[in-house]
Amino acid sequence: MHIIDRRVDPGGKSLANRQRFIRRARALVRQAVRDASASRKIREIGEGGAVTIPADGVHEPIFRPTSSGGMREHVLPGNKTYIAGDHIERPEGGGGGAGSEGSPDGQGEDQFRFVLSREEFLELFLEDLELPNLAKRQIIGEDVTRRLPAGFRTAGPPAALSVTRTMRRSLSRRIALGRPSPEDIERMTREIEEMEAAGDAPERIATLRAELERQMRRSVSIPFIDPLDLRFRRLETHPEPIARAVMFCLMDVSASMDEAMKDLAKRFFSLLYLFLTRRYERVEIVFIRHTHEAKEVDEDTFFHSRESGGTVISSALEEMVRIAKERFPLDQWNIYGAQASDGDNLSSDNPRAVALLRNAILPISQYYAYLQVANGGEERGGGGIFPRQETTLWRAYSEVLEPSLPMAMRKVSSPRDIYPVFRELFEKKSDGVGAE
Amino acid sequence: MSHQVKSKDTLLFSDHDWDFDMLSRIYGAVEKIAVDEMGLDTYRNQIEVITAEQMLDAYAATGMPLLYKHWSFGKQFLRNETLYRKGWQGLAYEIVINSDPCIVYIMEENSATMQAIVLAHAAFGHNHFFKNNYVFQQWTDASAILDYLAFAKAYISSCEERYGLEAVERLIDAAHALQHNGVHRYPGKHSLDLVAEQRREIERREHAERLYNDLWRTLPKPRARGGRDLNEERRRALLGLPEENILYFLEKTAPRLAPWQREILRIVRQIAQYFYPQRQTKVMNEGCATFTHHRIMTRLHEKGQISDGAFLEFLQSHTNVVMQPEFDDRRYGGINPYALGFAMMQDIERIANEPTAEDRSLFPNFAGKENAYDVLRDAWANYRDESFILQFLSPEVIRKQRLFRLVDDPVEEDLVVAAIHDEDGYREVRRSLARQFDVARQDPDIQVVDVDLKGDRRLLLRHHVVDGVTLEAGDAARVLQHLANLWGYGVRLVEEDDQRTYTTLEAEPAQAFA
């Protein structure tokens, strides 16, 4: 009998099968992840969790008997009052309590529910998304570096020891200092032995002995490898050029935005935030919120604090242009903008907003996305008797829109739409510059 | 037996915790009782201590320490993990593998008492059963299974490298769909020996010549069809038809499979065959293990090697294991094989030692002979669930469990109680229960009956319908699709019994393997 402690074995034996399962059911799981994320709060998306997929997609069929029909018999324990010949009313659903052992496992189970890890969840959630036109690359910071061989040095960790170099130096030193080789010593020893055996020239033998002794001393005092010989490979770190990007998040928090609309906008930015922080290491995010005046705020304030006032879109655009000019030089940064508003701008401000967009923002931006939020009621009304009125801002922006400009506009009216719209805006284009 | 004083010296453990030395001591004490008193004969044991995480891994691979990779095991893992993490399902205390040496996984969380129970249960009860029961001896090769699994895993992963993950996965999907139809149920010659075939043919002819009588010549000639029938018969014989082992049939005769695909079918088939005896002996296997642990723990307590507290802990856990909810209980989920097996084996012991007149008339071979262990060892060696119940289910057990037989006939309006635990009912209940545990009856009887070799090579299968229970149509269609893909040509499944044909399902290969 052996007792083996397997607890120390590396875990994760099932990881490969688990990944195979997720790969196999990828389309289903992806859909489930997206459905799940529509219903759950944005902050929870980053935490993974349970998803449910239709069991049909991962069903393993076998030949098995139907659960109903045909003549069946059961032997059951715990008879109380029955005697032979008694009739019992058939329980609901053919089988029911009495016949439950007749139905094989896994039947009637049309949902398969399981828990995804955080990584798996986000991986599926953010699949196929990217920042478009991430083109400008720059050398920055120290932490993105590559190590390249750069000659040799005299000290270093044992792992970096260059054996070839060391042995070459050792050899040349031994030759230079005249260290006798083992063969030399052997040859001399043999010569002495032969002479002794022959028995002649005793003085000659004595000189040879003295010489041999001297050589032996030499071979001890001149080491085979001296610390002086050691050479280590040297690596130098070179900074790698990487793409840097900044995302400007512009959110309208004016009084015309009701709670539902603000919620939509926040959901959108939360998704954007999640996407950027997960998929890109070097993306700066600038949060700007505006009413009739714009202010750069931190993340917490952006998502959580409230404010209200009139609406002057151009104030936010101006703020964006100012910050970009100050902190994000155009030759080093990929600049992106995302704006959410109800489109209910002060009409006198529209021309100014459009001018800013056209002349100052789009020329420096890689991509600019405008999201117009409406509340559900309005949207539904649009399909009815009255043709839906486009907001003034939407109309103004539409005029700017043209295929050559890196700009996109979408409307959203319910939380359900957020994710699809978000995907549309950031879906990986096949010909796009794939970069991460 | 005189009452012994339980002192610290005789106790194997006095605490909840265990360590490896203690495990060895417990094993030694358990082994002494198992071997010396009960006469159990086991494979060498290899005890492996594992964590809950590793137990989940083991679950996913049907307990096997190594198994090829496939998504269905990942699905199993995710299902168990979810159930476990939500607290809906506890984990087993042990898993035991029918191999030589016998591998017993025990959980690190088990208390010292639990470790004693699982060692008695798995390392001796199950182990003895695996080594001695005839179905295991006939159908499994305990000394080779681990090597075979290692080979299978390496082979399949090399196929994945060579032919691509997707191709292999699709093949295994198809093979898994047919794995319950990849089992030989009866020992016998399965590969056709062509030399023997020829010899038999000559013998037959000689036999015919000996019996030749000129008088037969005067009989009117049969119609020409007779000749064709003979050919059909001959063709079927050459193909080894009818054949119920569909995977075996495909492996040997599917016209379009590549050699590696045949080998993978073979691997799936061999592993299904390895597990088949476990399905045939649930009641006996668990009964044997439960009876063994119950006896050993009781003896350990009597000998003063475990404390009263530990014995109570054991009783509580044992009671949970052999709990049989009654049919109208919400917890009822079928007959608990642990409970039934344990009850029957205890009953055998009772009959051997303190028989009633009824027992003497029913079990004259061993009633009152006081050789309970001999009878049990004989039963463990020579029966499977169905025959064990037929042979040993006594009226006493039927009465105790208050078993009754219910018939669900679709033409009747109600369910009918056909038999209860009375003089008229014992036999009927016993026969019916035995049938309920007969795997060959639970699995639908599906056989390959013919191949249309002259025409479009359509493969013909027949489901012999028993009691009017047909196949679940959705699943059957999907399995048939897999089958058509493997066969490479159309397949037809006819569900019929002697009176009528129920349904005919057909499938054409959609993405044939080639």
Image (spheres, coloured by chain):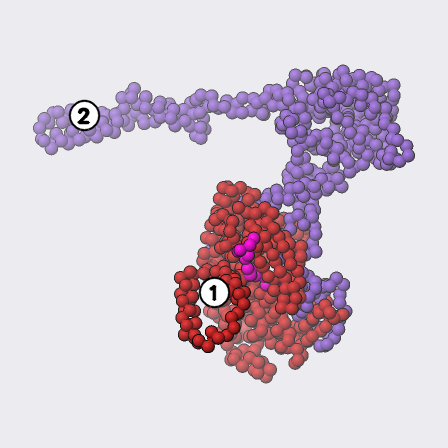
Measured as percent of width and height from the top left, residue A120 is found at 64, 40
Q: Could you tell me which chain the residue with mark 1 belongs to?
A: B
**Marks 2 & 1, CB-CB < 8 Å contact:** no
Q: Which picture quadrant has residue B451? A: bottom right
Whether B443 is among the magenta residues is yes
Q: Which residue is mark 2?
A: A210
- In this rendering, the answer to whether A375 lies above or below A367 is below
Measured as percent of width and height from the top left, residue A41 is found at 75, 39
Q: Could you tell me which chain the residue with mark 2 belongs to?
A: A
**Residue located 78% across and 20% down the image:** A400
Res. A395 in view: yes
Q: Colour of chain B?
A: red
Residue type at mark 2: give it.
Ala
Measured as percent of width and height from the top left, residue B65 is found at 52, 52
Q: Tell me the tag on residue A181.
A: none
Q: Which picture quadrant has residue B501? A: bottom right
In this rendering, would B7 be left or right of A365? left
**Residue located 61% across and 51% down the image:** B508
Identify which residue, A203 or B266, lies in the foreground.
B266
Q: Which picture quadrant has residue A309? A: top right
Identify which residue, B263 or B45, lies in the foreground.
B263
Q: Which residue is mark 1?
A: B188
Residue stretch in magenta = B442-456
Residues under labels 2 and 1: Cα distance?
Answer: 89 Å
